[in-house]
Every structure is written in structure tokens, then in C-alpha cells.
Amino acid sequence: MSGASTAHSVVEPSAATKRIAAFLVILYAVITMVPLAWIFATAWKTPPDSIAYPPKVVFDPSLEGYCNLFTTRSRQTQDYIAELGPPQGTCDTVTRQREMVIVGPSNYVPRFINSLIIAFGSTFLAVSLGVFAAYAFSRFKIPLKDDLLFFILSTRMMPPIAVAIPIYLMYREVGLSDSALGMILLYTAVNVSLAVWLLKGFIDEIPREYEEAAMIDGYTRLQAFFKVVLPQAATGIAATSIFSLIFAWNEYAFAVLLTSGTAQTAPPFIPTIIGEGGMDWPAVGAGTTLFLIPVVVFTVLLRKHLLRGITFGAVRK
Amino acid sequence: MAEVRLEQAEKRFGDVTAVTGIDLTIHDGEFVVLLGPTGAGKTTTLRLVAGLEMPDHGRVSIGGRDATPLSPMERNVAFVFQQYSLYPHLSVYDNLAFPLRSPTRRVDEATIRHAVERVAKLLRIEQKLQNRATRLSGGEMQRVAIGRALVRSPSIFLMDEPLSSLDAKLRAELRLELKHIQQDLGATVLYVSHDQTEAMTMANRIGVLDHGRLVQIGSPREIYESPRNIYVATRLGMPSINLLPLSAFPSHPAPTGTRTIGARTEHVAIARGNGGAHARVEWVEHLGDQNHLHLAIGEHKLVTLVDPDLDLSVGDAVDIALQQPLYFDADGERIGG
């Protein structure tokens, strides 16, 4: 063995190690993304293509899934369809090819709006309550502080669905069943414990000197909280908001149980999209694809904030 | 600026008594340094004046008015912290403007601009006003922190080791600047430090704290020359005062009751063979302009300064003569002080 070694760092992994790591990461990413890709693809298939066996990987894209997602249709005779005027837009054409006519919008948009209101509403409430509670736990002497914190955490130890029936009965009694307010309160209750614990960690990291300085500079504690603590807790607030939103946005079990009509969210609605002769998989795929967008956008918007917060911490210490 | 007075102030945290029986008056325009090791109660004293802590006993008055029940924002004091001194999410300008923008002050933006620019000029940070607070060097940060205190007219400046996180050169520079600014403004300052150089050079009076008690307060000269006890004597002086039992100097005439002799450099005369106590050179540290001489008198050690021209080397026998040293009794209290 000659001394042909090139200069290399002991800390940096070697090029070969890096290549293996990259390969494994890409492999994992591909595996986890296959179902997503399958959903995106299904959304662009026709209903027959979506259930073809063997599955079609190459297919002619069709807007039928998206059209079906947003409309309700009824079957008509060819004669009836022939007597109608020219089709109004792409969806009309696609529908008539299936010997159907569009009779009105589907419930997808109102369900989607319900999801937006309930998920963002409960996230806002949970994070707002959480940040105040976390500040109090972080800064003040509270009798039985540790026990209270443990109690708050313990609400997360049991699977929420375990209390589904009592909650269902309670909601029915007080008239919160199938109401957006009821769902917001429920998701807030589940998320607030997470918010308190996460945010307490972030607020503990903010030195008290900042608030003390602000109080000496002529601000009340509450003003100092808004002017000094909140801006510095932005990272934690962003992270907590993302976690809360993802939970509330994706929650299925309670939504199925407690909502059916006016307050139904998108998750229980999407699987109920029935076409002729079974599930309308392209419409389900389309509904799922669109359903992913808000959380992705929200996370991407806050991502910059998250990263900046992380580097800030690194510089400060 | 105003006179600030602490009367019999006491503060406990659980079982720990942080400060007790503190009587301290800081006169209008005076610079008082509180000196003591970690845990002596320096910072607690400062926080009591600021209103960040409420005393368990005693009272705090500012400008003749009882301030004990007042919150920090009502006391109109300025505080410079050791670290975390700037609001990291704000620019330098906004940091300096922050106290003036408080809802209680209602200063208009034009006045704020004027005040901020005046202070920035005074502290030579005009070029940095638009920087983010986190994009500053340590020295600039502490300048801005001091500026934030200067931008309004508080009754007193409270400073908690504001220079201790800086390197030695910067510390010396800012020390001088701070003293000049204080003199120009006639500011009342209560300054916490464990650095004796800061205390000696900046203070009108030094208060020495030990275990939550104010042991002695006086001018730097008084504290240095007439310490009340051994503890105070060891606070000042480089190299630190030598404490030797009387038995090390059997021929030295000491007042009755003396147990310990405190000998600073200026109390020790070194010569060869003049009949004093017999000592041996153990080590010589060359510091350039002076030498630290480590001596052994029997089993006792002594460190003093000598002229570098004095040609001594390890193992040399020298004679020591004491010139008006300090005498302490069995309790460590000074005799004849």
C-alpha cells in the first residue's frame, strides 16, 4: 500500500459514504412517495382506467376525476342529451360522453371550506391559548406546576377516539353536534396540550432579561410579552402551528362521528364520493390532491421562518 | 438623576438569604460600585433598586420618594445587563428607541430620532443604527445597551457587570468611556462588578458585599488602605494581599491581639541581609515592567512585586522588613482601623 491517499477530513464522511447515504435517502423518498404519486395519477385517469387490472401506469389524462369531484350528475338517455344545446365547457363534454348531465355542484367546496375554518380556527385558538399558558408555566411560580403540566400532557396519553362516545353524547346534549364551533373546540382541546408543551420549551429558551429590560424600559409585563417575547417565540409558534394544523386538517375519526352535514370536513367527505358502480376513484384522487394543498402551502410559508429561527438559535448560543 | 436609598433591605429566595440589612445611599451624581464574589448579593441589590425583585423587608426610595411598591416601569430606572442586552429582533435604532416608544412615555418620533442620534453619536455607533442587533460585535452590543439606558433620563443607571463579557482591551476602553460619560452627564450610577480594576477606576465609592451583607462602603482609597476586615482587604490589590500569621515575623512589633498580618506589596521591603525575617526566593515571574516575587518564609508563602532591576533568582535568601502593614485579630477584624 503506497501513500496515495488524498487529503480527507476525519469528520466529513467519505465520498463513498455520502453516495450510499444519498442512495438510501432517495430510495426511502421514492418508496414513501409512491402512494402520493399514485393518488396524483389516479386523479387524472378515467374511472375505467383507475380500476383497470393490471394497473395502468401509462394512460391518457382525463379531467373526469376533477369534473366529478365538483359536480353531481344524473344519467340521461342519448336522445335527451342530443336535444340539449352545445356543452358548456370541458366538464359538460366529459360528462355527456358518459351519457350523463351535470345537475349541480357537489358538496366538495363547502366541505373544504369547513375544513379550512375548523383547522385554522382550532390552530389559532390552540396556539394562542398555548402561548399564554406556556409563558405562565415558564415564568411564574405556580403551585403544583409540575403536576399541572403532567396533567396537561396526560390528556394526550389516551387515544382521543377512546372518549369519542362520551363526547358524542355530550355534544348531542349541548347542541354542538355537526357544528363548526364544536369541531373547533374539540381540536383545540386536543392540540392545546401539545401547544403548551412545545411552546414552553421555546419560551424557556428566551432569556428573562429581555422582558425585564422591557419592563424597566417602561412597558408592562403584558406589553413586554407582545413586544419582546412573542417575536422571539416566532419559531416555536410556527412549529406549533404546523403540528396543530396538520392534526386538525387530517383528523378523520371525530369528524366522521360528530359531523354529517353542515359542519362536515373534507376527510370524511372524500371517501364517500361514489360513482356509478362503486367508488369514483379519480374523483377521490382529485379531492385528495387538492386537500393536500393548504397544509403544504402553510408549511412552505412558515418553513423560511422555521429555518431562520433555527440558525438564530445557533448563533446566539 | 436622583438620590437612591436602600434601607434595611432584605431579600430571601426560599431558604437562601440573598441580601440582608442593606443600608446604602447613592447620592445624586455619584458612581457607586458594588464589589464581591458570585453569590454575594450584588445583582439582587441592583434588582431591588430596579423593582425586578420586591424586598421582603426594608424599603427603596428614589429621589426621596418611597419606591418600594412601584413596578419597574414606574421607577424610571435604566438597567444594563451583563448579556442578552439587546432585543435581537430589532435594529440598533429600534433598540435605542424602544424605551422612548413605551406607552407610558408617548414621545413623538421626531424627538425619538433626535434622542437616538444624539446617543449614537456619543457612543460612536452612528454607522450601525440600521444594523440588526445580532449583527454587532460584543463591544458594539454593550455600547448600544448603554445607549439604551442613556437615551432617556432615568433617576439612576443600574449596571450589572456590563463589561465582563468583553475582551480585556475593549473592557479597558469602554471603562474609560463610561466614566467620561457619567461625569459629563452627572449621572447617578450603581454598578455591579467583581473586577477590582473597574471598581478602583470608576467608583466614587465602593461597597463591598459578603454573603448578602454590605461589609464596608467608602472611597476606593479607604477600602484599599483601611479595610475593615480580612475579607475586604482581599477584595482589592494585585497581587492580592499576603495574609501571614504573626509567628512568621517574631521580631515585628505588632499591636496586642494581632493574629494575622496583612502585607501588601507596598508594606514589604526586600533586601539582602538586613536582619528581618528570613525568606527564600521560590519563583520569579517576569511581567516586563515589574516582577512577581514568590517567597517562602518557613512554611508560609508570600507574593510581592519587585523592581525588575533587582537581581534575584530562585533559591536566593532575602530579608523582609514590614512597613506599617495591616493587623487583624482572631476574628479577621482589623486592629487600629
Image: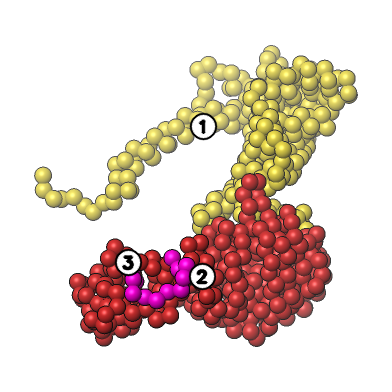
- Asked if marks 2 and 3 fall on the same chain, the answer is yes
First to last magenta residue range: B248-259
Residue A285 among those drawn in magenta? no
Marked residue chain, label 3: B
The crowding category of the residue bearing disc 2, from other C-alpha atoms within 10 Å (few below 14, some 14 to 19, many at least 20), is many
> A72 or A241, which lies in front?
A241
**Residue depicted at 77% across the width and 78% down the height:** B110
> What residue does disc 1 label?
A33
* Secondary element at image label 3: strand
Of marks 2 and 3, which one's residue comes earlier in the chain? 3
Which hue belongs to chain B? red
**Residue depicted at 40% across the width and 76% down the height:** B253
> What residue does disc 3 label?
B301
* Secondary element at image label 2: strand
- Asked if marks 1 and 3 fall on the same chain, the answer is no
Chain seen in yellow = A
Residue A295 at what x, y percent from top left?
65, 39
Q: Do the residues labelled 1 and 3 touch (CB within 8 Å)?
A: no
> B131 or B2, which lies in front?
B2
Calculate the distance from the C-alpha at mark 2 to the C-alpha at mark 3.
21 Å
The image quarter in which residue B212 lies: bottom right
Report the side of B275 relative to A57 (left or right). left
Calculate the distance from the C-alpha at mark 2 to the C-alpha at mark 1.
81 Å
The image quarter in which residue A269 lies: top right
> What residue does disc 2 label?
B334
For the question of whether residue B176 can be seen, the reply is: yes
